[in-house]
Amino acid sequence: MRQRLNVQYVIIGIVCIFSLILPVSILADDGCAQTIEGNDKMQFNKDTMKVASSCKKVTITLKHTGKLPKATMGHNWVLVKTADANDVGMAGMSAGIDKEYVPQNDARVLASTKLIGGGEETSVEFDLSKLDSKEKYTYICTFPGHFSVMKGEFQIGS
C-alpha cells in the first residue's frame, strides 16, 4: 500500500511539473521570433513568414548556411512594402557594402539586418505596431543581384 502511494505521488509530481513547464514552452513559441536561412545558391529557405498580430515586437534571425564570404555571397534581410521591393533592391545595390547594401535613412526600409557571410548569423527586432495588417509586405536580400530571387511574403495574421 505504501509503495502504491509513493508511485501516485511521483505521478502527481510529474503532472504538476509538466503543467508548469508546458504553458511556458507554448508562450515561447508564439511566432514573434523567427529564423530564416540564406545559402550560397542565392536562396532563402522560406518564401513566406507569418507573425501573429498579437506580437508587439518581432525578432527575425538570419542565418547564412553557406561558406562564401559576405563580399562574394553576402545576405541580409530587409522588410519593405511589396510595392517598394524592386526600388529598394535597386537602391540597396547603390548603397554599397559599407552600408550593408541598405539605402540609409530610407523610409521604405521598415527593418533590416546586417549583411553576413557564410556561417554567420544576425538578428533584427522591430515594432510590429508600426505595420498595417492590411498592407502587403515583402522581405528581400539587397546584396547586388539577389533581390529579384531572394524574396518572400511577410504576413501579419491573427
Image (cartoon, rainbow, N blue to C red):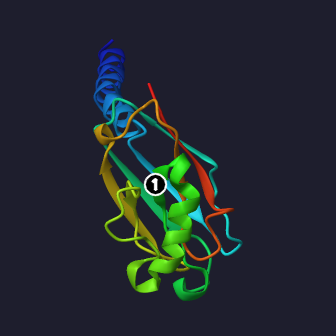
Nearer to the camera, 75 or 97: 97
Vertical arrangement, residue 15 with respect to residue 95, above or below: above
Nearer to the camera, 112 or 80: 80
Nearer to the camera, 6 or 156: 156
Q: Residue at x 40, y 85 (%)?
A: 98
In the current view of this chain or complex, which residue is farthest to the top? 1
Vertical arrangement, residue 56 with respect to residue 45, above or below: above
Q: Position of residue 71 (x, y in %)?
A: 54, 88
Q: Residue at x 45, y 78 (%)?
A: 95
- Does residue 9 appear left or right of residue 114 in this picture? left
Nearer to the camera, 87 or 75: 87
Q: Residue at x 43, y 71 (%)?
A: 102
Q: Quadrant of the C terminus?
A: top left
Q: Amino acid at mark 1?
A: Leu
Q: Position of residue 122 (x, y in %)?
A: 40, 68
Among the 4 quarters of the image, the one containing residue 39: bottom right
Q: Position of residue 46 (x, y in %)?
A: 62, 51
Vertical arrangement, residue 29 with respect to residue 146, above or below: above
- Does residue 50 appear left or right of residue 13 in this picture? right
Q: Quadrant of the N terminus?
A: top left
Residue assigned mark 1:
79
- Disc 1 is placed on an element classified as strand
Q: Residue at x 38, y 57 (%)?
A: 111
Q: Is residue 138 visible?
A: no
